[in-house]
Image (cartoon, coloured by chain):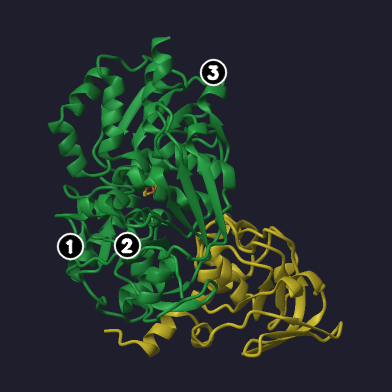
Amino acid sequence: MSMNIAEKILAAKSGKKHVEPGELIIADVDMVLANDITAPIAIREFKSSGATKVWDRTKIALVPDHFTPNKDIKSAEQAKILRDFAHEQKLTHYYDQGEVGIEHALLPEKGVVVPGDLVIGADSHTCTYGALGAFATGVGSTDAAFAMMTGKAWFKVPTSIKFVYKGKLNKWVSAKDLILYTIGDVGVDGALYKAMEFTGPVIDKMSMDGRLTMSNMAIEAGGKAGLINPDEITMEYIKGRAEHKWKVYTSDKDAKYEKVIEYDCAKIEPIVSCPSLPENTKAVSKLGKVVIDQSVIGSCTNGRMDDLRITAKIFKGRKVNSRVRCLIFPGTRDIYTQAMKEGLVDIFMKAGAVFSMPTCGPCLGGHMGILAKGEVAVSTTNRNFVGRMGSTESSVYLSSPAVAAASAILGRIGTPDDIKK
Amino acid sequence: MKFTGKVWKFGNDVDTDLIIPARYLNTSDPAELAKHCMEDADTTFAGKVQKGDIIVAGKNFGCGSSREHAPVAIKAAGVACVIAKDFARIFYRNSFNIGLPIFESEEASAKIAEGDVVEIDADKGVIKNNTKNETYTVKPIPPFMQELVAAGGLIAYGKTKFKIK
Ligand code: SF4
């Protein structure tokens, strides 16, 4: 019987030939992830249950990325719980300062998650790894604790929505614009409890960086996972990275979907999500004048090489507007190093931007770039909820790196084409 | 798994802030949380709910944050189970993980009224409304999930089922 990629992975990991949407299964996970916010609770649960040893010390990733380098005493205490546990359990995938990156940029880059994996993470953007053809989803702390003990997790097999992206991309339109457009179309609960599958000729040609951006934001449509069928681009990406065996699962031609939604990308312009919900999308051309105080480029959504390269291209020979603070956050150390090698950091510096070490930082209003009351930011991150980047009276517009970079120069939200005007 | 109890009825999109307001999240003590269960939806609820009572609600019950405190508060308040048209994803997971049985039934969600006494037979997948003398179907909970609830949640289940070193 035919199955789609989500069903195939869940069937394989639960030892079944076939699964149906709605079915509850218990499955073997390939990787469990937690960060410096969620791991301390999971570790507490783990310990209070009387467990003394993790199920497999090579399959637990602890990534202290949110409030590190430790922002204050409280976060230092949290990070210490992680550190102590990682050392005590001799975890092989613990990333301390000097190695740490933003979890969802780091794990694919290090080959810690590979196609066909089943991954759970105590972080909602765990869905990012769907770009590799892995089934990955965010869970609660008890789930993470349980998986640390047993290597297992339970799932309700989701129904799937297939998204088909066709047509020619307009100038300055990137993966980020496509996913914002999609969320604007289906709404923040449009894919609640469902797996989103991104397909079509535009996805087939999209770089892995772009694919990771799209899958990253599946959760902003309520999605449980955001999957892309592995292809040559996937294989090229995992070459030399994959640290364990992968398996390619792809959707059968006659696989069942709850819905198939087609988009003609030629109709999609550079877009922003206006405050304070990702579904409040508007084409930049129809936005009117929005003056900004801060431009943030980075995060697990857009902190990869594609994003830094386009930013540098726009910044080259130009200056950030004197009233704008432009903060650039690479996803990982390797991205940081590569950006230096390519001379991008030099361009950022000359333009007057800040180039930070990898951290979640301002994305969740944690540290390193908090907004004051009344301030406005354009940001390549993934959430623009009330108070997400600081004061509950500040506001965030979500955009692509190209729009965030152009806006930094303009001092208002615009596209690179607006700069010369 | 069988439950019989008196119903407290709630509407659509009851979010986790209504179930347990954020101002009480500085504790994770179930008894303390139970005192504020459903407080922002019905301030009198915690005082009047009896052990074994049942919550029936509309669509998207438990939407909002991923706080596990929400199902913990409901369970600790003595509620036997929750019936809704459907549940928000993380609330759904968290409920089973902490041992609170929940059931999805559009029919039951629409037809059951506050004060009705209902009987749920989870194995057969039926809900009997003793007050109205009606029967509704409910998606049966698979054996695994029943075990989870019977064990008292995911961690307790794991301890008996899997070798935890
Ligand atoms: S960068 Fe932002 S969205 Fe991504 S993991 Fe960090 S806080 Fe979460």
- Label 2's element? strand
Contact, mark 2 vs mark 1 (Cβ under 8 Å): no
Residue B127 in view here: yes
- Residue at 64% over, 75% down: B77
Same-subunit check for callouts 2 and 1: yes
- Chain identifier matching the yellow colour in the rendered picture: B
Disc nearer the start of the sequence (2/1): 2
How far apart are the alpha carbons under marks 2 and 1?
16 Å
In x, y percent, where is residue B34? 61, 71
Q: Residues within 10 Å of mark 2 (few under 14, many from 20)?
A: many
Q: Residues within 10 Å of mark 3 (few under 14, many from 20)?
A: few
* Residue A7, disc: none
Residue linked to disc 1: A243
Residue linked to disc 2: A33
Q: Chain of mark 3?
A: A
Establish whether ligand 1 lies closer than 8 Å to the Cβ of label 3.
Answer: no
Disc nearer the start of the sequence (2/3): 2
**Type of amino acid under label 3:** Lys
- Label 3's element? loop
- Chain identifier matching the green colour in the rendered picture: A
How far apart are the alpha carbons under marks 1 and 3?
48 Å
Residue linked to disc 3: A289
In x, y percent, where is residue A233? 26, 49
Q: Is residue A24 left or right of residue A358?
A: right
- State the image quarter where residue A143 is shown: bottom left
Same-subunit check for callouts 2 and 3: yes
- Residue at 49% over, 19% down: A291
**Type of amino acid under label 2:** Leu
